[in-house]
Image (cartoon, helix red, strand yellow):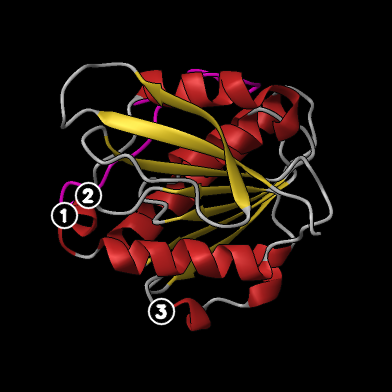
Amino acid sequence: MRITGGVARGIALVIPARGEIRPTTDAVREAVFSSLGDLVVGARVFDAFAGTGAYALEALSRGAEFACLADKNPRACEAQRKNFASVVKSILSRGKPAPTAKFLNLDLLKPQSVATTTVARANLIFCDPPWILWSGQSEKISKLVEWFTTVVATNTESTRLILESPAATVPPPPAGWELVSRIFKRKGNDSPMATILKRLPAT
């Protein structure tokens, strides 16, 4: 598993040996960032259920200026810090300024535990919850997305929510968002699918 683009392209990412981490495949992640294009440059990122931190770190490699990574798994948080250090080292070696990051060890299914200012200032939100939640607790994911909607800035068309799920689950666009595209690289109900949503302007 590696960073697929940007100045830290090719950097290998640490994956915890235990802790039920299911990283996004390189192919899906690369396709997502290809779709996002220049929206990543200068972006502020919030990575929910960050796991290894692949989405956030890929964004930093591609020009994002700040990322907040949140996960309740301590092993995941440890891996994120190691991976961030590797990405920053690569960025600095290319003569580029180092991006900044914040790491949160908390349960995202309790949104009140996240400072709203952290999310409100983000214009790229990656949300890749454990797949078991889609089969038994999808209402909790819906509430989390609804919370994103209530706190994220509404005055920019550059805001995107990238929601990853099993291909068998097709989440409808929540209120306040419209569908941009759905990305998947393999057929089958258990293959990963990324739904890219655009923040609608306030009315």
Percent position (x, y) of residue 57? 54, 39
Residue labelled with disc 3: 110
Q: Earlier in the sequence, mark 3 or mark 1?
A: 3
* Nearest the eye: 178 or 155: 178
Percent position (x, y) of residue 30? 48, 20
Mark 1 lies on a secondary structure that is helix
Quadrant in the picture for residue 60: top right
Q: Is residue 6 left or right of residue 12?
A: right
Point 70% across, 33% down: residue? 40
Q: Is residue 57 left or right of residue 101?
A: left
Residue labelled with disc 1: 135
Write down the region rendered in magenta.
1-20
Q: Residues within 10 Å of mark 3 (few under 14, many from 20)?
A: few
Q: Main secondary structure of the magenta part?
A: loop
Residue kind at label 1, given as amino acid type: Ser
Point 49% across, 39% down: residue? 55
Q: Residues within 10 Å of mark 2 (few under 14, many from 20)?
A: some
In this rendering, the answer to whether 184 lies above or below 68 is: above
Pointer 3 with pointer 1, Cβ within 8 A: no
Residue labelled with disc 2: 131
